Amino acid sequence: MHQLTLAEIARGLADKKFSSEELTKVLLARIAQLDPQLNSFISLTEDLALSQAKAADARRANGESGALLGAPIAHKDLFCTQGIRTSCGSKMLDNFKAPYDATVVAKLAAAGAVTLGKTNMDEFAMGSANESSYYGAVKNPWNLEHVPGGSSGGSAAAVAARLLPAATGTDTGGSIRQPAALTNLTGLKPTYGRVSRWGMIAYASSLDQGGPMARTAEDCAILLQGMAGFDANDSTSIDEPVPDYSASLNGSLQGLRIGVPKEYFSAGLDPRIAELIHNSVKELEKLGAVIKEISLPNMQHAIPAYYVIAPAEASSNLSRFDGVRFGYRCENPVNLIDLYKRSRGEGFGPEVQRRIMVGAYALSAGYYDAYYLKAQKIRRLIKNDFMAAFNEVDIILGPTTPNPAWKLGAKNSDPVAAYLEDVYTITANLAGLPGLSMPAGFVDGLPVGVQLLAPYFQEGRLLNVAHQYQLHTDWHTRTPTGF
């Protein structure tokens, strides 16, 4: 039962082959048995899950239907969930129980999804390895000595290990797509504003976007259908009709123009990954796609621009965690300044402190124009590059990551080396574009992903291409040994 995809679960529930309650009990037992190896969950919500499963079964018995009705999922632990710890992977929020549901949580619950728990993550979504969590590092089920990627590494590891069929993630600079690539999943970052950020604890407000993580494009379409839509509570939410993502999966790729940027194949890319990407291109050509080399000339500036903008926004967003209103508070402060300094110093981990300091520096008087303003100008140039490219092609294809998953601890002493792993993913966040990573093969037994980017609100096109690719390849069906 644990091998079923979301789509297969929906069909099984509709055909009364099993109940949501039966499936939920099987998966909760599997999590209890296997997750100690992975550390992919921060909190399990057994009572909530069983009550939601029983309610879903009752709704089906009364004639209701729906792809998510009774389907088990988990939420990355930065989506507020009423009455349940929402920690953001941080000591700062270890004792915080959200007083309300995030819009994504509420929408999926209304659709009948069953929440099994909250998944582990890099602290405040800051990291590319899921090693900065207060609750310890997450292990990659393909090799327990390697990272699963981050910051949505808990969601990725749990789905890859077949602990559940799908989970929510968030993507600020690649935090859905990069762990999806490193764990052999399909992960989708929607267009900025497509999925509500209300109740999603912020890292960098102009970059953050929630999205689905699953084994197949078909499952991502189902989960995105439940997540997407306008939300009046979110000022960045865009009032754009949500199409039927599943309906577009089977469209032909005949004549689809796919652009491959020459800048993607630089010296920093593992040549074995480059070969797998070229193999993916050949497979799509067989399906009727037309391949064209394109250029994204300002891509080289993406990393420095991102690592000015994101920390700047983080320093502003995280100023609310002051030891006064909620979250961690130091013991016996001597005055207000001591309360602030010690609560933050003790409550935030080193990676979060590092990014807050960088961001505060970039926004400070005398440096704002030199760093933050210049980074925003580069951001616009990167967006312009994409707009020019999409005048020539329908989809942009390339690697998701320059390397396969690295060993736990291998980059802890060199944060910049970890930052460089985001080189292919951050441009989509800077431009606000939708992006998807799908399985494309293996290097040394570790998964590799291929990334697809599309124009605004063309998530359906990404899912269509990925689904057609997955109908003709079997990378996405591979299961890690022992799971």
Image (cartoon, rainbow, N blue to C red):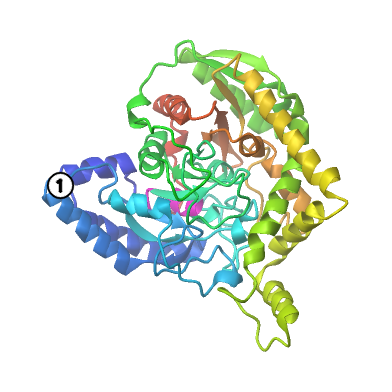
117 vs 181, left or right, is left
- Whether residue 399 appears in magenta in the rendering, the answer is no
Name which quarter of the figure residue 278 lies in: top right
Q: Residue at 63% x, 42% y: name it.
A: 404
User: What amino acid is labelled 1 in the image?
Assistant: Lys
| Location of residue 93 in the rendering, given as x and y in whole percent from the top left corner | 56, 70
List x then y, in percent, for residue 329: 62, 79
The vertical placement of 40 against 4, above or below, is below
Instruction: Say what secondary structure mark 1 lies in.
Output: loop
Residue position for label 1? 16
Residue 306 on image: x %, y %: 72, 43
Using residue 228 as the reference point, say whether residue 383 is left or right of it: right
Question: Is residue 414 among what the camera can see?
Answer: no
312 versus 450 height, above or below: below
Which residue reaches farthest left?
A: 62
Front one among 408 and 299: 299
Depth check: 40 or 90 in front? 90
Residue 318's image quarter?
bottom right
Quarter assignment of residue 373: top right
- Whole-percent x and y of residue 180? 53, 43
Q: Check disc 1: other Cα within 10 Å, few if <14, some if 14-19, many if 20+.
A: few
User: Which region of the structure is painted magenta?
Assistant: 155-165
Which residue is most to the right?
A: 366
Residue 82 falls left or right of residue 445: left
Question: Residue placed at 76% from the left, 34% from the top?
Answer: 378
Residue 158 highlighted magenta (yes or no): yes
Residue 125 shows up from this direction: yes
